[in-house]
Image (cartoon, helix red, strand yellow):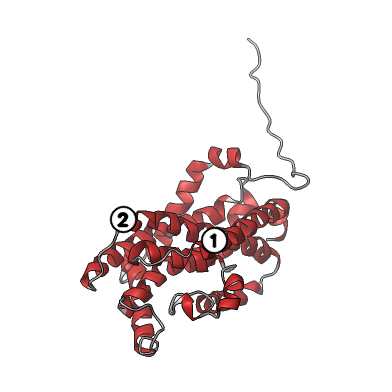
Amino acid sequence: MQPATTTSIVIRPSRGWIGLGARELWQYRDLGYFLVWRDLKVRYKQTLFGAAWAVLQPVLLVLVFSAFLGRIEGIGPAGVPYPLFAFAGLVPWTLFSQSLNSAANSLVNSQNLIAKVYFPRLLLPLAAVGSHIVDFFIALVVLLVMTPVFGVLPKLTILWLPLFALFAVVAALAVGTWLAAIYVRYRDLRYAIPFLIQVWLFATPVAYSADLIPRELRGVYALNPMTGAVEGFRWALLGGSLPQATILLSAAATAVILVTGIAYFRRVERTFADVI
């Protein structure tokens, strides 16, 4: 009888700038599904309103914006009720802001898991972003119901909504991978992230129309990834002229942030277990 053979797997740190590691991420897809489900259960465990928070947060902001900003003439486009205009901007923005916050905190919140078990660390920000897509669909249903109530009938451009929602998700992942990797080493980032999201909200045409931005500054303004995502989302739902140049500039900025963010994340992930 021959002795049983054993297989040893040696995990060594990678060297140099490495790629996405898509094959390894696919191999650990079941873990990714588990992480998404875990985040959903933790978020709504022992809550009073449960998944209704996905709608309550943007609705409350719409009420605040309508009370204080909706009275300003020209802040929104003509022919579109301001509450609908604001809510159409807040739905993709909420998806982005919540996904960004969760992705930035995903590594530190899972530090015990990182220190004990090997898996591709990029799964954590990916799962954190993915868990908020459920909330987005709940808010989107409410938005689609609101649209005819306010007298606006969607056109065929509504078919582009998933693309611009994906735009917001990719933007959140792009910035979130950067912040997650930096947050592992510099813990005072916990104070900067909420402030960053608050400032970013007012630097994005959520509560106001992008037409209010001076023409000479619109090129720089479009480098904000969420400018193209919000403007495109509104165009798909409410119609109007397509802000093509804005969307292209925002998409280019998002691509640069995503590629560099993943490259930096993969570069430093070998040290996460040591410093977290």
Q: Please tell me which residue is depicted at 65% across the width and 24% down the height of the picture.
A: 6
- Number of other residues with Cα within 10 Å of mark 1, as a class: few under 14, some 14 to 19, many 20 or more: many
Q: Is residue 107 visible?
A: no
Q: Are marks 2 and 1 in contact (CB under 8 Å)?
A: no
For label 1, the SS is helix
- The image quadrant where one finds the N terminus is top right
Instruction: Find residue 171 and name its label.
Output: 1
Q: Can residue 219 be seen in this view?
A: yes
Q: Please tell me which residue is depicted at 37% across the width and 76% down the height of the picture.
A: 86
Q: Please tell me which residue is depicted at 48% across the width and 81% down the height of the picture.
A: 212
**Closer to the camera in the image, 101 or 156:** 156
**Closer to the camera in the image, 115 or 60:** 60
- Amino acid type for the residue under numbered disc 1: Ala
Q: Please tell me which residue is depicted at 65% across the width and 20% down the height of the picture.
A: 5
- The image quadrant where one finds the C terminus is bottom right
| Snapshot quadrant of residue 28 | top right
Instruction: Find residue 156 and name its label.
Output: 2
Q: Position of residue 79 (x, y in %)?
A: 30, 77
**Closer to the camera in the image, 200 or 213:** 213
For label 2, the SS is helix
Q: Which comes sooner in the sequence, label 2 or label 1? A: 2
- Amino acid type for the residue under numbered disc 2: Leu
Q: Position of residue 207 (x, y in %)?
A: 43, 79
Instruction: Find residue 14 and name its label.
Output: none
